[in-house]
């Protein structure tokens, strides 16, 4: 385990970034790793870009990840994957993204073109890292896109030291009942 | 699932991962606070969320959302005057609203002690400015503590509470956005045994509580002397920390800038001269002895503080007074007064200060290729229907004035409604001033229902009294939506349960507004004609444009229905669609997605089935089918 592993999570308000971020912090804690983080949401309502920072290891002080320094960029939406990857992915880092599209205003108004999977791949290539796509059908419900990504992160070992068992412990802290069961099932497959 | 309310009340010591706002609530419990009041505003509303998680019957203090920050401050002051330890919290600019009463607090003897929790917002993450409220501490002679994260927020609230009670005064705990929301594991102490309620404290026969003319001076003298006493208090001294010894370089810092400094120094060049650090927890009054000792031990000292040069100014004056030869390095340019001191910014500042500290520049991001994604009104938002309809009644030269709330987002394209913004409740009066010189332009202003009760009333009274030619549209969504759906005096509920439901219409009538119309904003055609009619009439007039917050309504409906939640999502009928793009470019609900062939489709993730878009399609191509599960 390194003594510093930085994760930058990006998405659109309403996608459940906060839960994903807290699950990663709690999973790290369950794995015995020091972790901290911070949600950055300007305004409460959905629709704008939201981001969350997670920092794992003893050499992390601020709750915020620096630009071009994230070992792992997590994006829940394709346009956010391109923007967040360009801003935060470090040399050799990993960009994991959920393949959903919620077009930003400029795209809907026809002022900019929509992002494509090749744009995400290009960001990873420019950083000599890799992109990991999480297909849209891996979430049975739009509200579980965040857990589908958590599952990909833990099952593919994208955060050193974190496995599905740690994610299970984290989710059990955060939810209960049928919602917990449905989310835990996503960690199995 | 962990129960937050039970966690916050645990008797034994424990550790938990929490945000700063939540950590403060455990501190309220441990410190024995008895009365808390607030007005919602980012970054502080989660303090109330954590309070709400504690069942009312087990809550060791009373809490209320007051109608505005000034009222909240006065309620907390009154409780503290009665002898009970009290606290009030609100956001940065809320202090401007509270200021008239706030600045008086240090003049008066406050038997119970009062902690003012400020949520300052360096970086203007969710505010109309990034004002540095340390200035208010200096202006009013109020002590101010500044934590850097959740753990310190917890500890420093308890210190602030002890200082406030011991010195019978008010103390500021200045949080910033990324202290409020910073999440880390905090070690909480055991809950102290409950202490009996203190005796009634307010005794105007013993103490002067009416500062007026010459009686102000003994009170001011005591406030200044108390500030000096707080500086010497062991509790206040205990929050300042020195790290490292023996370097010829030093940095004096506070708050999150300290964490960013530590991050930056992790990257420093091996063999470079690393600075020692004096990290201040007590920012006002400046702990002069600690600062003086630190200055004397170093040849060069950089003052690393976010926003304005408050510490810098005082420290330079101190060095001058004491004849210290230390070279004090302050802010070099305007940029160092702006924005958050995140690790990258601090590294850049340090590089400018001591170029040998780092090997080369920090890693740079790739240039952005797309416009940022601004926040926007939600699918189904009643404000969208309102702006879409009102815009059709206006001419290009007409003037629209925004206020604070979700409807502020109407200034973004494609609506471009609400062209100027000052503060909560400003809209009617700013519009009134504009209307004096309107020269044929018509002046329309907007105001939300929570803000109506918060600060909107005086401007309305003025418009009636002075006869201003303005149309006010009250954007009533039945909640305080932008800060997370808190109740307000118009909702029929308070934080503590059912409450009298104050009617916006009755309030307007009571204030003497004679010209009032009401409409549901989904009735877009009716709203358009109403605006046309009203604008043709003289004097001050109001349209109450009402629709419940659909984010709140949808969440509640989904929660009630559980897995069986169904909506009738809208779809574009490809055979009827003429691709004129009214829906996606002018109504502009975010559910509409552009396809490369020029067609429009509706996102299955986003559409809530409200159907408010359907009336906007001239071809009638927006259709709703049977209910579908989501």
Image (cartoon, grey):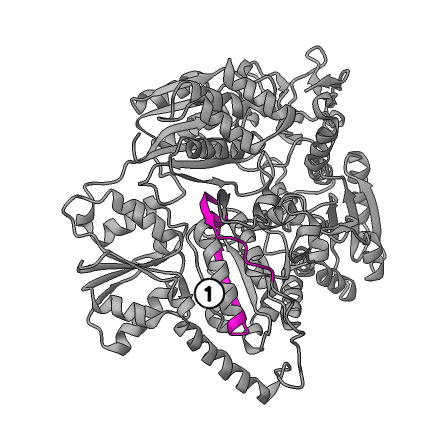
**Relative depth, front residue between B373 and B259:** B259
Q: Quadrant of the C terminus of chain B?
A: top right
Q: Is residue B294 above or below residue A25?
A: below
Q: Give the percent coordinates (x, y) of residue B619.
A: 74, 19
Outermost top residue: B575
- Residue A51 painted magenta: no
What span is in magenta? B165-194
Q: Is residue B392 above or below residue B46?
A: above
Which residue is pictured at 48% across the width and 24% down the height?
A: A150
Q: Give the percent coordinates (x, y) of residue B95.
A: 56, 62
Return the residue at label 1. Answer: B144
Which residue is pictured at 35% across the width and 53% down the height?
A: B258
**Relative depth, front residue between B625 and A26:** A26
Q: Is residue B310 visible?
A: yes
Which residue is pictured at 51% across the width and 74% down the height?
A: B167
Mark 1 Cα shell of 10 Å, populated few (<14), some (14-19), many (≥20): many
User: Which type of secondary structure does the marked residue at label 1 adopt?
Assistant: strand
Q: Is residue A23 left or right of residue B272?
A: right
**Relative depth, front residue between B579 and B101:** B101
| Image mark count | 1
Q: Is residue B112 above or below residue B526?
A: below
């Amino acid at each position: 385990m390194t003594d510093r592993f930085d994760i930058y999570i990006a998405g659109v308000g309403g996608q459940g970034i906060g839960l994903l971020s807290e699950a990663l912090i709690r999973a790290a804690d369950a794995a015995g790793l020091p972790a901290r983080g911070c949600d950055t949401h300007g305004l409460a309502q959905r629709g704008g870009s939201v981001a969350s920072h997670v920092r794992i290891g003893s050499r992390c002080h601020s709750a915020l990840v620096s630009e071009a320094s994230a070992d792992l960029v997590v994006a829940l939406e394709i346009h956010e994957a391109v923007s967040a990857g360009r801003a935060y992915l470090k040399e050799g880092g990993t960009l994991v993204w959920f393949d959903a599209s919620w077009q930003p205003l400029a795209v809907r108004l026809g002022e900019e073109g929509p992002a494509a999977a090749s744009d995400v791949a290009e960001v990873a290539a420019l950083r000599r890292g890799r992109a990991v796509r999480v297909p849209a059908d891996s979430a049975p419900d739009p509200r579980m896109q965040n857990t589908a990504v958590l599952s990909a992160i833990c099952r593919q070992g994208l955060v050193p030291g974190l496995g599905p068992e740690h994610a299970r412990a984290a989710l059990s802290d955060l939810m209960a009942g049928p919602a917990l069961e449905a989310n835990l099932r996503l960690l199995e497959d | 699932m962990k129960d937050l309310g039970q966690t916050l009340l645990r008797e034994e010591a424990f550790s938990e991962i929490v945000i700063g706002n939540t950590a403060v609530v455990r501190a309220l419990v441990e410190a024995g606070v008895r009365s808390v009041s607030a007005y919602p505003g980012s970054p502080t509303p989660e303090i109330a969320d954590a309070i709400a998680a504690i069942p009312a019957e087990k809550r060791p203090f009373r809490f209320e959302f007051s109608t505005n920050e000034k009222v909240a401050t006065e309620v907390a002051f009154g409780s503290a005057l009665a002898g009970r330890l009290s606290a009030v919290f609100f956001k940065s600019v809320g202090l401007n609203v509270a200021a008239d009463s706030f600045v008086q607090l240090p003049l008066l003897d406050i038997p119970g002690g009062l902690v003012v929790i400020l949520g300052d917002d360096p970086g203007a993450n969710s505010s109309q400015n990034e004002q540095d409220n340390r200035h208010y501490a200096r202006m009013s002679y109020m002590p101010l503590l500044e934590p850097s994260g959740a753990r310190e927020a917890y500890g420093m609230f308890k210190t602030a509470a002890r200082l406030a009670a011991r010195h019978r005064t008010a103390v500021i705990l200045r949080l910033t956005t990324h202290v409020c929301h910073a999440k880390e594991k905090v070690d909480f102490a055991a809950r102290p045994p409950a202490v009996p309620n203190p005796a009634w404290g307010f005794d105007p026969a013993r103490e002067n509580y009416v500062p007026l003319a010459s009686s102000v001076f003994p009170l001011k003298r005591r406030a200044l002397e108390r500030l000096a006493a707080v500086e010497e208090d062991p509790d206040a001294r205990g929050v300042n920390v020195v790290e490292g010894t023996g370097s010829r370089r030093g940095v004096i810092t506070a708050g999150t800038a300290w964490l960013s400094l530590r991050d930056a120094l992790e990257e420093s060049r091996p063999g470079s001269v690393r600075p020692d650090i004096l990290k201040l927890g007590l920012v006002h009054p400046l702990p002069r002895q600690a600062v003086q000792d630190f200055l004397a031990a170093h040849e060069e000292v950089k003052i690393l503080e976010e926003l304005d040069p408050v510490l810098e100014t005082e420290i330079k004056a101190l060095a001058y007074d004491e004849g210290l030869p230390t070279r004090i390095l302050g802010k070099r340019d305007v940029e160092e007064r702006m924005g958050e001191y995140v690790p990258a910014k601090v590294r850049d500042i340090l590089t400018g200060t001591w170029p040998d500290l780092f090997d080369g520049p920090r890693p740079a991001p790739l240039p952005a290729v797309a416009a940022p994604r601004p926040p926007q009104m939600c699918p189904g938002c009643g404000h969208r229907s309102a702006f879409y309809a009102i815009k059709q009644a206006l001419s290009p030269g007409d003037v629209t004035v925004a206020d604070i709330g979700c409807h502020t987002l109407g200034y973004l394209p494609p609506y471009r409604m609400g062209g100027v913004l000052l503060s909560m409740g400003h809209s009617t009066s700013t519009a009134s001033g504009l209307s004096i010189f309107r020269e044929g332009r018509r002046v329309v202003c907007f105001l939300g229902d929570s803000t109506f009760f918060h600060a909107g009333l005086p401007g309305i009274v003025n418009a009636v009294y002075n006869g201003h030619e303005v149309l006010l549209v009250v954007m009533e969504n039945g909640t305080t939506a932008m800060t997370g759906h808190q109740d307000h005096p118009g909702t029929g509920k308070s934080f503590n349960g059912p409450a009298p439901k104050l009617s916006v219409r009755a309030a307007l009538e009571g204030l003497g507004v004679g010209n009032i119309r009401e409409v549901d904003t989904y009735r877009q055609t009716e709203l358009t004609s109403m605006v046309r009619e009203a604008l043709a009439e003289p004097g001050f007039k109001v349209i109450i444009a009402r629709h419940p917050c659909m984010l709140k309504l949808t969440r509640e409906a989904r929660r009630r229905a559980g897995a069986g939640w169904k909506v009738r999502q809208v779809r574009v009928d490809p055979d009827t669609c003429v691709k004129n793009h009214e829906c996606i470019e002018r109504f502009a609900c975010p559910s509409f997605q552009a396809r490369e062939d020029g067609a429009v489709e509706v996102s299955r993730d986003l559409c809530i089935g409200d159907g408010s878009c359907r009336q906007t399609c001239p071809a009638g191509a927006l259709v709703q089918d049977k209910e579908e599960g989501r």
